Image (cartoon, coloured by chain):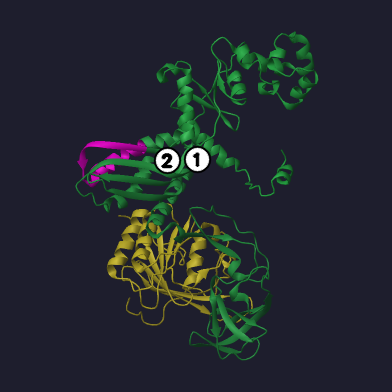
Amino acid sequence: MALADARAICPDLATRAADLAREAAALASLRRWAGRYAPMVGNDGTDGLMADISGVPHLFGGEADLRDDLQARLDRAGLASVSAIAGTRGAAHALARHGGGIVPDGRLVDGIGHLPVTALRVDHDTAEGLSRMGLMRIADLIPLPRAPLVRRFGSGLMLRLDQALGAQSEPVGGEPDAPHFGVRMTLPEPIGKQDDVMAGLARLLDRLCAKLAATHMGARRVRLELRRVDRGTVTVEIGLARPMRDPLRIAALFAKGVDEVDSGYGIDALRLSAPLTEAMAPEQIGGQHGGGATIRHEDALADLLSSLGNRIGFDRVQRLLPADSLIPERSFVLAPAAYAPPETAPSHAGPSRPITLFPPEPVTAATGTPPASFLWRRMRFTTLRATGPERITPEWWFDDPAWRSGLRDYWRIETQQGPRLWLFTTPQTRDWYMQGEFA
Amino acid sequence: MRFDPAPADPLTLLRQRVHEAEGRGRRAFALFQAARHPGPLVWIIPSHAPELPMLRGLPQGVGERLHILRPVGETDLLWCVEEALRAAPVGLVIAEPSSPMSLTVGRRFQLAAEAGRTTGLMLIRQDAGSNATETRWLCEPRPATAADSTLHHWSLTKNKKGTINDWIVDWNGATAAVHMVSQARQRLEPAAAPR
């Protein structure tokens, strides 16, 4: 039913937009739970699960009891569901979408013969063509000669029919679980020495990094949880300047954090996890063109940035990136070096720019335009040479408080005293400000 | 331990040592040295300092190699300097300590620079240096007579492995090349006691 029709019947209808990603996540968690009924559970479309329960039902007391158990648990969880048990995957799919139930062994034709042909997982055109020919139910298809049907509807219809009736096998494949990057270790005796903790950490790191390597991932954050004998938990967490899975280099970053841990009466369990991971493809090391030296060089720089970031904060280890703006303050960005690769600044033509930039500082006792002499930071300067003005207008699409005073005329002023300074004036107020110093 | 012989070019900093620059033109001197050092550059600025390097005004090839650290507090700043000096891949470490450096701090930096084979340059306030420094430069911008020249007066006021001297150079702030305005000369005045 279309939404407009539904609204016409029930004007107060409450609607929600479909959230496919969260629905898929919910189905995935339900699939994990359904593992209690079968070793192989796979997704069946976007709204169903398919489990291969061969050899399982007697553990629950029979197929009927198993289905009752499943339904009761899903009902208790508040999930409205329909389930079916049949000898083939196609039959179970058909029955589950048309009322559910159990098809006893060897009676597939009786069990699903009364269902409409749409239950056979055929596309819409085929189903419509069949109904136009008067073939409404699956039972109607079974006695018909196969060759004319194939010629008219393609081999897909016969394949689906054979799969539903067991003439064609169709296995259930379990879905691979998302990799989990966590390892733990419990100890028979509590430990308290720093060396012991680092030795345990080294063993856990070997296992974690092997897991990361198997899935071509690299850790961006690594968390070590130490459980003490008194059930207290101490957490040491480090960040990495780039995805990494080298146990020795990660262990070196933990040294400071582990040093500060209060072990209390002793630590009897360690848990190491990588809460944040990024894809990291295998790299070729060595090589005849000195690739190994370059990689070692980059590794050493990444190690330095990691250790600096873990002490002073990763947002304080920065890099200058070019930005597309004529406003001096916005012509570059200070970005965290761990998350921004270096960019080559585009070659720039035009008026020169100072080497240092600071927030505008007022200049007093300025006489004339450009000023012949002025006071700045309690020092008197006399102008030797002035270059300008360079007029910069504010970007009206940003509301920048510093630029509310309107457009600015920038002057490069060489002083008798030596310094080469970057001054600007706002033509509206005729005030002078200092914003930078040239080389 | 062997050190490199004193460099032939008088404006080259001795490698694996820590140097100091003071005066108004110290940042220009630091950028001049940055352009002459290959490899990654680290510039350590206290987080409260308002002056920042402006990307479009930097010499060619410096901007993309530059890493800026902005630690809070003097202890973290000194720690960052030592850590960066101790790291092998860094080409030049530039730092702006905000308080006078003690002899211990200076010695530690020299040892770290030797261990990491890295050169360091401290941009210090007036008379806030350490006696352990290899060289100390007093850098002042000079007014130029011609319209197109940017003169710098760089004088070497302390040198552990050589003589002191001063140069007036014309450096336009864009490349690693520099034009000596006046040749180095024989000193006529009596030598001042080394500081």
Asked if residue B149 shows in the view, the reply is: no
Residue identified by numbered label 1: A280
What is the magenta range?
A183-206
Secondary-structure class at tag 1: loop
Rendered location of residue B171, percent (x, y): 56, 70
Chain identifier for the green-coloured part of the image: A
Q: Amino acid at mark 1?
A: Met
- Residue A354 among those drawn in magenta: no
Q: Quadrant of the N terminus of chain A?
A: top right
Q: Amino acid at mark 2?
A: Arg
**Viewer-proximal residue among A297 and A68:** A68
Q: Is residue B137 left or right of residue A407?
A: left
Rendered location of residue A382, percent (x, y): 57, 88
Task: Provide the chain ID for the residue under circle 2.
Answer: A
**Viewer-proximal residue among A143 and A424:** A143
Q: Is residue A278 above or below residue B107?
A: above
> Which image quarter: residue A430?
bottom right
Residue identified by numbered label 2: A245
Marks 2 and 1, the one that precedes in the sequence: 2
Chain identifier for the yellow-coloured part of the image: B
- Residue A199 among those drawn in magenta: yes
> Which image quarter: residue B103?
bottom left
Secondary-structure class at tag 2: loop
Q: Quadrant of the C terminus of chain A?
A: bottom right
Task: Provide the chain ID for the residue under circle 1.
Answer: A
The alpha-carbon separation of the residues under discs 2 and 1 comes to 9 Å
